[in-house]
Each structure stands twice: as C-alpha cells, then as structure tokens.
Image (tube, rainbow, N blue to C red):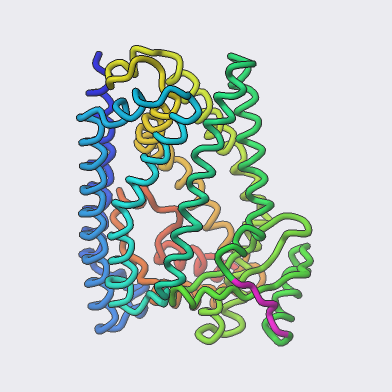
C-alpha cells in the first residue's frame, strides 16, 4: 500500500463530502418556506437572503477548492520532505515544518477572508469590522493557532523520549485537562477579542436575576458584549462555572428585542445548565481526546508511512499534518452522532423557556434571530443529519406550541 496515495484519496474524499454539504445548502435555499415560518421574511428580505446564501456558498466552494489544490500540490511535489531534509535539529524541524503548514493555510485563506468580510458580508449589511479590528483579530488568531499547534507536539516529543508508551496516558490526561479548563477560562479568554460592560440596572437585569434564582443560579455578572463592532448578527450565551459563570448579551440584541424576548433566550440557555448538557458532553470529550492521542501515537510509530512521502524516517511534524487532514473526514462522521445529541438538548432547553412562561416570547425571538441572522428555514434532511446542531425553526416552534397546548388543557 502506498500511503501517499491513500492520504491523497482521504483528503479528496473529505473535499467531496464538504462539496456535497455545500450542494445540500444550495438545495436548502431552493426549498419552499414552511407555512409556520412564512412570516419570518418579507418578499424583499427573502430575495436578499437567497442572494446572500447563493453567493456565500459558491464562494466557500471556490475557497475549499483552492486550499485543497495547494495541499495536494505540496504533497505531490514532496515539499515538506524537502524542507525537513535540510534541518538537522528535530525541534527546529518541528517548528519550521509546522510553521510553514500554518503559514500556507493562513496566506491562502487571507484573501478569501478579506473578500468575504469586506465584500460579501458588507454587501448584505452584516460586516461592521474595521480594517484595524480585522488585522488585530487575524494576528491574535494566528498567534493562538501557532501556540495550540506547536505546544502539544513539543510536549509529546519531549515526554516520549522518557516515557515511551506511557506517553499515551500522560498526553491523554493533559489534553483532557486542558479542554476542560478551557470551559472555565472561556469567559476570561473572550476578553482578548471583545469588551464587556455590566448590564445597567433596569427591568431586563431584574428579570434575568429573578429567572436565575428560580432556576437555582445566582449571577454576580451580567455583561453586554460589543459584538456590533464586528457584525450586526445577534446572539447571547451563558458561560463559565462557579464564580466564572456569567450571562453575556450581544449589544445587537438590546435595541431590537423586547425584555421578555431576551429573557426567553436566557431561559433557553439556563435550560442547558439545568439539564447539565455540558457535563453530558464530557464522555464525547473523553472519546475525542483518546482518539487524538492514540491516533497520533500510532501514526508516529511506523517509518514506512513517511518514506512513501519522501522522508527518510518518522517526522513528528508531518505526522501531525497527516493526522490533522485525515481527521477531518472522521470528524464529519462523528458529528452525525454529536449533532443528533445536540438537537435533543436544544428541544429540552426550549421547553425550559415554556416552563417559566416564556414560550411565546421564545418563538418571537427565534423568528427574529432567524430573520436577522439569515437562517435556513427549510433544511435538506441529509444536511440536517450531517451538520445541523439545532432543530429547524419549524421543528422548534412545533415543539414549543405542543407543550403550550398541553399547559392550557
């Protein structure tokens, strides 16, 4: 078996699956809007929505095609083995090879990101990012990518020389701890990109605190995030644990939604907390960490894999590239299961808003969110299975109405 050919087949298959997803998205744009949600878009907004979706999807296909062509050409012409052969120090080789891998992806993606943000998103009124903010976000994101890519490989190689097969256990534990810690640190890490200001006293703050008390939570922190400096898109979330727990509201919500509509959104978010959905996802996190560690370990045990690519032996840096690109296909398959679980959690969280008397307000807010964020209203069933983490708007409204009817009987 030639592993170089096998790898090329895997990345082409991944590309074709992503192309299928894009084609299913186009099909979803063409599907008729269900009667229950026909009031979400007026005629003008609906036409604008379709135009935006078609342009975004086609642009995404072009971007994916260009990126995979660059990757295929670099593999076919043995670019990475050429670089590796000219570096004698193992740790320097890891730094250089992975830096080139990240830099190539960055440089290929950058023109597309600029065009998408400053042409497509701006054309349809979504983008508010200034060139300075875009540059700052891009550089910080690039720095973070370097750190999270290089650090695990250096750590792995360092301890492998001492612990050998025990490296699997140590790496697994370390990765799991880091991923869990990220959930705790997220409220603080998000400050890198955004400014948070306390929500002023008033009816909204009072109702949010009262709802939290009813659900068994106390919030010392309710913040407004300056999302409008990048986009007009709307959202809100409930994050953190213990003293880091906080309610975060996009400033784009405040002037467009009623108090009850915003509280309804948080009744939904609190539903996730009450049902311990984050904790329920820990088994999936454990499985993911195990697959990552065990997969990379075995991939870096066989020199003959690397000789097919033009290396003289095992390359830990190129092993990560192989693993990362091959993992994309496995991730698509694994997401089918995790998305199904996620949709079940969303249904249950919606019912939390209904339970506290915000069912109708949640329906109203979901329709506004769908309209203002240009959400699909009739998703192709196969697309929903492959990538959709939430039920469709129609399904959510039907589920809420069903429970509202139960309460009135």
Point out the image quarter for the C terminus.
bottom right
Residue in the picture at 60% in, 61% down: 190
Q: Is residue 202 magenta?
A: no
Q: Position of residue 378 (x, y in %)?
A: 31, 63
| Residue 9 can be seen, yes or no | no
Q: From the viewer's perspective, is 357 left or right of 10?
A: right
Residue in the picture at 59% in, 17% down: 161
Q: Position of residue 4 (x, y in %)?
A: 26, 23
The magenta span reads 195-200
Which sits in the foreground, 295 or 117? 117
Q: Is residue 199 magenta?
A: yes
| Residue 330 can be seen, yes or no | yes
Q: Position of residue 180 (x, y in %)?
A: 65, 43
Q: From the viewer's perspective, is 326 left or right of 69?
A: right
Q: Quadrant of residue 236?
A: bottom right
Q: Is residue 52 above or below residue 297?
A: below
């Amino acid at each position: 078996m030639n592993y170089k050919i096998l790898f090329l087949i895997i990345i082409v298959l991944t590309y074709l699956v992503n192309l299928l997803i894009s084609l299913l998205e186009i099909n979803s744009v063409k599907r008729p809007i269900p009667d229950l949600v026909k009031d979400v878009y007026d005629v003008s907004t609906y036409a604008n929505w379709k135009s935006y979706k078609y342009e975004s999807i086609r642009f995404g296909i072009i971007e994916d095609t260009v990126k995979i062509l660059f990757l295929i050409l670099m593999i076919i012409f043995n670019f990475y083995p050429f670089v590796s052969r000219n570096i004698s120090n193992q740790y320097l080789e890891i730094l250089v090879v992975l830096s080139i891998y990240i830099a190539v992806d960055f440089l290929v993606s950058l023109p597309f990101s600029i065009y998408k943000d400053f042409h497509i998103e701006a054309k349809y009124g979504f983008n508010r990012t200034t060139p300075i903010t875009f540059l700052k976000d891009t550089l910080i994101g690039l720095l973070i990518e370097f750190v999270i890519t290089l650090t695990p490989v250096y750590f792995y190689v360092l301890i492998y020389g001492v612990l050998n097969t025990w490296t699997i256990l140590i790496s697994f534990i370390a990765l799991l701890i880091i991923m869990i810690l990220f959930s705790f640190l997220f409220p603080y890490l998000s400050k890198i990109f955004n400014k948070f200001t306390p929500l002023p006293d008033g009816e909204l703050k009072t109702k949010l605190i009262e709802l939290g008390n009813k659900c068994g939570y106390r919030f010392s922190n309710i913040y407004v995030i300056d999302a409008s400096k990048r986009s007009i898109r709307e959202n809100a979330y409930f994050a953190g644990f213990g003293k880091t727990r906080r309610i975060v509201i996009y400033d784009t919500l405040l002037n467009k939604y009623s108090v009850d509509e915003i509280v309804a959104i948080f009744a939904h978010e609190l539903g996730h907390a009450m049902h311990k959905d984050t904790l329920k996802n820990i088994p999936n996190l454990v499985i993911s960490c195990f697959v990552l560690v065990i997969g990379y370990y075995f991939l870096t045990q066989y020199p003959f894999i690397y000789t097919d690519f033009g290396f003289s032996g095992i390359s830990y840096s190129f092993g990560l590239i192989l693993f990362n690109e091959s993992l994309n296909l496995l991730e698509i398959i694994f997401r089918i299961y995790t998305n199904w679980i996620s949709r079940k959690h969303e249904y249950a969280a919606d019912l939390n808003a209904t339970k506290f008397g915000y069912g109708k307000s949640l329906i109203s807010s979901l329709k506004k969110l769908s309209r203002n964020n240009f959400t699909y209203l009739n998703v192709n069933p196969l697309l929903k299975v492959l990538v959709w983490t939430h039920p469709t708007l129609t399904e959510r409204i039907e589920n809420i109405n069903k429970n509202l009817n139960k309460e009135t009987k």
